Image (spheres, helix red, strand yellow):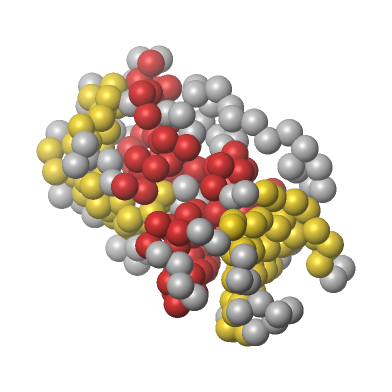
Amino acid sequence: MTDTDVGGARGALEIRASADPAELSNVRQQVRKFVEGAGGDHDLAADLELVVSELATNVIEHTQSPTLTVVVSRTSDDWLIEVSDVGDLGILDDVVLPDSSQPAGRGLFVVGALVDDMTIVEVGDSYAIRCRIAVA
Amino acid sequence: MPTVSPVVPWSVVEVGPGEFEVSGEIDAHSAPALAQHLAAQSASKLVLDLAGVTFMDSSGLSVVVNLRQLGLTGGPDLVIRRPSRPVVRLFEITGLTDLFVTHPC
């Protein structure tokens, strides 16, 4: 896990971890520390933790990738979150809230509710879900 | 009073018949064990005190939605007591706030 300055951003956190649920707590802890260190308040840090947790869980449960990569950065205008790998490139085509009786399937809906937009982007030889939250 | 999974950052403690205090982080790592533990209970009512939950994502939400469904089909009725801020936030985002009988912090 590294803190880096990349792409003109004011700061960035890059995390590479095994695609293992046991890694989720540590990943979230790193995200919280970065966001609060980069000027985000408690509520924003909680939102970014939730976004990253949902997207990382998606990698773990719905792709064959042995690793997950999380990049969180802040520019003057935005917070950016990228999580890879993406298994199904059509994963964002039909994000709906399941019926209240359905136990599963709310992860991407939760992400969509917390961010200003989310897209799939090509990153190197893989794909990531990129989310943007405007700086308040 | 059993405590489950002392290694990872969560716990469930039985504080009375069918009453449990859940604490820590409920995610894809902890949710399966939490679900398994609670599904094994035989009480007619299941009360979950969630005041100590510091993080919950949709994996945790799946646990409580599934428990509610079990209650509607002959399993123990589910009561959520003192949901913490992260839990309330998740209920609000997913439109499930009115689904559960809750007693706030």
Q: Nearer the viewer, residue A8 or B83?
A: A8
Q: Quadrant of residue A109?
A: top right
Q: Is residue A132 left or right of residue B81?
A: right
> Percent x, y for residue B78?
29, 26
Q: Residue at x 58, y 83 (%)?
A: A3
Q: Quadrant of the N terminus of chain A?
A: bottom right
Q: Which residue is drawn at 42% across and 28% down?
A: B96
Q: Which residue is drawn at 60% across and 79% down?
A: A11
- Toward the top, the furthest residue is B73
Can residue A60 be seen at all in this image of the molecule? no
> Percent x, y for residue B71?
35, 20
Q: Residue at x 59, y 57 (%)?
A: A134
Q: Which of B61 and A93 is in front in this view?
A: A93
Q: Nearer the viewer, residue A45 or A30?
A: A45
> Percent x, y for residue A71?
64, 70
- Toward the right, the furthest residue is A125
Q: Which of B51 and A37 is in front in this view?
A: A37
Q: Is residue A24 left or right of residue B2?
A: right
Can residue A95 be seen at all in this image of the molecule? yes
> Percent x, y for residue A97?
59, 30
Query: From the viewer's perspective, is residue A57 above or below residue B77?
Result: below
How many badges with numbers are in the image? 0
